[in-house]
Amino acid sequence: MKMSMYGLALALVAPSALGFNQEIRARFTPDPSQPQKNVFINQTPNSGYCATYPDECRMNETFSIRAPINFGPKGPMLPMAGVSIRVPAYWRQITVTNSDTLETEIVEVRISGIGSNYVLSNTAASLTGETDILEGHRKLWGGLSWVYAPANCLYSGVGAYGPNTYRFFWKTPSEGDCTKVTSFRIPFMSFDTLDFAYELRTPNPLGMSSGLYTGSINYLLNGAARDFNIGDMVANDSNLTLDFVLDVQHTLKVDIPPGGNHIVLEPQGGWSSWLDQGRPPTRLLRDQTFLISASSRFKMSLECELDLTDGCGIIDRESGYAGLVNVSVSLPHGLTDSGGKPAMRVPLNREDSATFQPGVYVDRKPGTLHFDVAERETAFFVRNSKGRPYKGNITVIWDSEV
């Protein structure tokens, strides 16, 4: 148990129709050192409990906010009166929307801890007849000060007190009132802040487009339907709004080795069978490797200097004879086609883009572009060859805008 002592403080508040807004920001950026870790990282600075005791929150992957919201004062309170605290500890869903694509995803949030600093009208020692400050706080609440959470809440090990103040924080694993009962009359008391811890469940960023996804959730602080009940006291703000911003920063990068943009089509095994033995080639082909880094969906298509059906052609520029070159792609493990199958020799064309999806972040893994002239076109090229090359520009496009 950690204890400390603070000086005298007094908070008197008046209700207001205003609300408190808090931005909750999380970011996904692929990490080459941890390609299997595809999660959002919370970017919201901690305040309150997790800022003071970061190890407690790090272990549980929780975060905290201290909001300048006051509750009360309330009084007088007679012996055996209960002071109850209840928070929305269950998971609630928020729809977040990409501001550019209008795609939507679901974020879940729950309040996993609650705390404040209670302020008494008199010192705890004077209310109980004690001389020791800490013993006064203990005796005021039946022998257990507010570091010890009542049923439905859990002890966090943290308490800090002054003559008439006590800062506490409790964990909230489930719904329900957490009630402390006073043993002495208290003319009035109030709470001078709202500390809360929260947990997030975020969607899989690999299935999201790049950009900012935003959405909000509102909690009521006053009235019969309030989400936060702090001692049945009136808050000086009526609403607590959490504004979520999910920042998705994907990577799509392709590296072609030097000279890889110049493709020479040849028979398998080279030209020796034709030159030395007079056997014409049956196919012309070439494979070109590349390195790809990808953390999001992307599509691939072709642009052609010479359009033939839905693909690209090469041509003898003097005779005008031309034929089709088939282009396909094989991608590394971790990238699949639109049906979830391994991306092996997926055809590429001009009219319909081929779409691919990462299951994990792929960082500088090798893929292959396959260029192939089928048997019929190869025979046509050989039959009509005039000793001149067949040429054509074929542009392969990797596009992250799916």
Image (cartoon, rainbow, N blue to C red):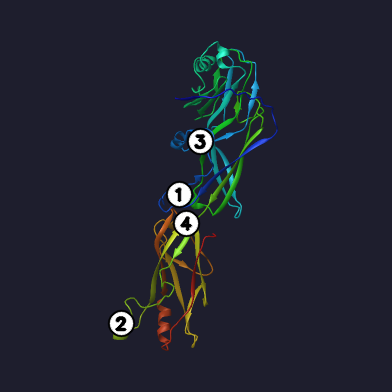
Say what amino acid the circle numbered 2 marks: Ser
Q: Residues within 10 Å of mark 4 (few under 14, many from 20)?
A: many
Q: Earlier in the sequence, mark 1 or mark 3?
A: 1
Q: Residue at x 63, y 26 (%)?
A: 71
Q: Position of residue 386 (x, y in %)?
A: 42, 89
State whether residue 213 is above or below residue 394: above
Helix, strand or loop status at disc 1? loop
Q: Position of residue 217 (x, y in %)?
A: 61, 39
Say what amino acid the circle numbered 1 marks: Asn
Q: Earlier in the sequence, mark 4 or mark 1?
A: 1
Q: Which residue is mark 3?
A: 51
State yes or no: discs 4 and 3 in contact (Cβ < 8 Å): no
Q: Which residue is mark 4?
A: 357
Q: Earlier in the sequence, mark 2 or mark 4?
A: 2
Q: Position of residue 331 (x, y in %)?
A: 41, 62
Q: Which residue is mark 1?
A: 38
Nearest the viewer among 358 and 251 is 251
Q: Residues within 10 Å of mark 1 (few under 14, many from 20)?
A: some
Q: Residue at x 53, y 45 (%)?
A: 26
- Alpha-carbon span between mark 4 and mark 1: 14 Å
Q: Which residue is mark 2?
A: 273
- Alpha-carbon span between mark 2 and mark 1: 51 Å
Say what amino acid the circle numbered 3 marks: Ala
Q: Earlier in the sequence, mark 2 or mark 3?
A: 3
Q: Earlier in the sequence, mark 2 or mark 1?
A: 1
Nearest the viewer among 103 and 239 is 239
